[in-house]
């Protein structure tokens, strides 16, 4: 199964998630959307202090990038990813201090450079990496202090 189909199946397995077409449209409008034979990635810049709803709703106004005249983002939120994540950071148009994602219904934060180094060194593959859907409940700062104070 391709990373796109894996990501779509994971996303659609939770009926409380936004419709697939909304997820795609939202990330095309104000995020990053990548689909290759090796990786699927939907991520967007966000302020790490945003509400849970902002992380879970790809259309949330608080998710809008700084160039749209809203809050300055300090975190890349990986809403959904599948496939070979070793090159995930090749698709970031610019660096932000943090990366967030949902794993096992917990919103997690990692230092951008540490996570980048970890993924690149392991060349990690995942068939179910992250899904930032409606059931993201808790926050986990990963035990790391963040440079932005979100830790």
Image (cartoon, rainbow, N blue to C red):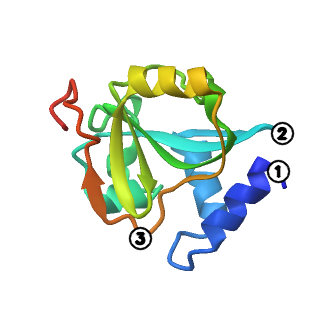
Name the residue nearer the viewer: 94 or 2: 2
At 40% from the left and 64% from the top, the residue drawn is 105
Q: Give x and y (percent) for residue 135.
A: 41, 70
- At numbered mark 3, what does the secondary structure look like: helix, strand or loop? loop
Label 1, label 2: how far apart the Cα atoms are: 6 Å
* Res 6 quadrant in image: bottom right
First in residue order: circle 2 vs circle 3: 2
From the viewer's perspective, tell me whether residue 51 is left or right of residue 80: left
Name the residue nearer the viewer: 32 or 65: 32
At 60% from the left and 27% from the top, the residue drawn is 122
Q: Give x and y (percent) for residue 11.
A: 61, 65
Q: Which residue is mark 3?
A: 135
Vertical position of residue 145 compared to residue 26: above or below: above
- Please rate how many residues cluster around mark 2, counting C-alpha atoms within 10 Å: few if below 14, some from 14 to 19, many from 20: few
Q: Which residue is mark 1?
A: 2
At 63% from the left and 74% from the top, the residue drawn is 13
Q: Give x and y (percent) for residue 37.
A: 83, 39
* Figure quadrant of the C terminus: top left
Vertical position of residue 95 compared to residue 62: above or below: above
Q: Which residue is mark 2?
A: 37
Name the residue nearer the viewer: 143 or 135: 143
Name the outermost residue toward the bottom: 15
């Amino acid at each position: 199964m391709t990373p796109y189909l894996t990501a779509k199946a994971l996303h659609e397995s939770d009926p409380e998630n936004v419709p697939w077409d909304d997820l795609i449209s939202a990330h095309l409008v104000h995020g990053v959307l990548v689909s290759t034979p090796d990786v699927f990635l939907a991520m967007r810049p966000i302020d790490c202090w945003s509400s849970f709803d902002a992380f879970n709703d790809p259309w949330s106004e608080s998710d809008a990038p700084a160039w749209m005249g809203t809050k300055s983002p300090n975190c890349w939120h990986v809403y959904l990813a599948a496939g070979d994540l070793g090159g995930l950071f090749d698709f970031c148009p610019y660096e932000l201090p943090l990366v967030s994602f949902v794993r096992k219904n917990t919103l997690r934060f990692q230092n951008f450079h540490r996570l980048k180094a970890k993924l690149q060194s392991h060349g990690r593959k995942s068939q179910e990496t992250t899904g930032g859907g409606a059931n993201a409940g808790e926050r986990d700062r990963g035990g790391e202090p963040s440079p932005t104070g979100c830790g």
